[in-house]
């Protein structure tokens, strides 16, 4: 039951993101498709580094609320990262299937469905979830660092 609730809520949140931020989501998936191993590595580095950063921030009075805010932002990023990776997977699958001009919503639906089907496989589901999280986090990191240079 929880998996079904998670699946349908991911679809809803993904559709909202597609409606509100279609260009940003497209850029993020292009980053994933250009270099998936790089985004996977950056995502791994983000996951490894968040603990020490939160710990260091927690030692000061000013840093404690910042640590809480950073933890909240990271928690949201983890969930958004899976949606980004699922959309990238959907774009890859739709390109391989030679779908002519599929809608972004269909592409996302394909990707998120495949992600949740793979998550059901014992022993492989947790690995797919971790990989999707790392790839999505790496894409977010790459996207925002490239846009910070333009400021």
Image: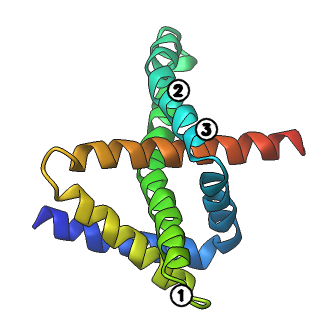
Under circle 2, the secondary element is helix
Give the residue number, with chain letter if any, for mark 1: 99
SS at badge 1: loop
> Disc 2 to disc 1, how far (Cα)?
35 Å
Q: CA distance from mark 3 to mark 2?
A: 11 Å
Q: Residue at x 51, y 42 (%)?
A: 73
Pick the quarter of the image with the C terminus.
Answer: top right
Q: In front: mark 1 or mark 3?
A: 1
Question: Which residue position is annotated with label 2?
Answer: 45
Q: Is residue 119 above or below residue 26?
A: above
**Closest to the observer: 15 or 119?**
119
User: Label 3: which residue?
Assistant: 38
**Viewer-proximal residue, 109 or 18?**
109
Q: Is residue 41 above or below residue 105?
A: above
Label 3 neighbour load within 10 Å: few <14, some 14-19, many 20+: some
- Residue 65 visible in the picture: no
Q: Measured from the top left, where is residue 24 in percent x and y?
A: 68, 64
């Amino acid at each position: 039951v929880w998996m079904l609730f998670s699946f349908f809520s991911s679809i809803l949140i993904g559709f909202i993101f597609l409606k509100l931020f279609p260009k940003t989501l497209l850029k993020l998936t292009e980053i994933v498709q250009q270099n998936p191993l790089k985004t996977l590595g950056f995502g791994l580095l983000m996951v490894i580094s968040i603990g020490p950063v939160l710990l260091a921030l927690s030692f000061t009075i000013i840093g404690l609320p910042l640590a809480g805010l950073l933890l909240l932002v990271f928690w949201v990023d983890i969930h958004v990262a899976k949606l980004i990776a699922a959309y990238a997977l959907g774009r890859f699958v739709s390109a391989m299937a030679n779908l002519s001009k599929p809608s972004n919503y269909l592409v996302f639906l394909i990707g998120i469905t495949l992600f949740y089907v793979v998550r059901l496989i014992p022993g492989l589901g947790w690995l797919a979830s971790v990989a999707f999280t790392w790839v999505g986090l790496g894409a977010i990191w790459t996207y925002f660092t490239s846009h910070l240079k333009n400021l």
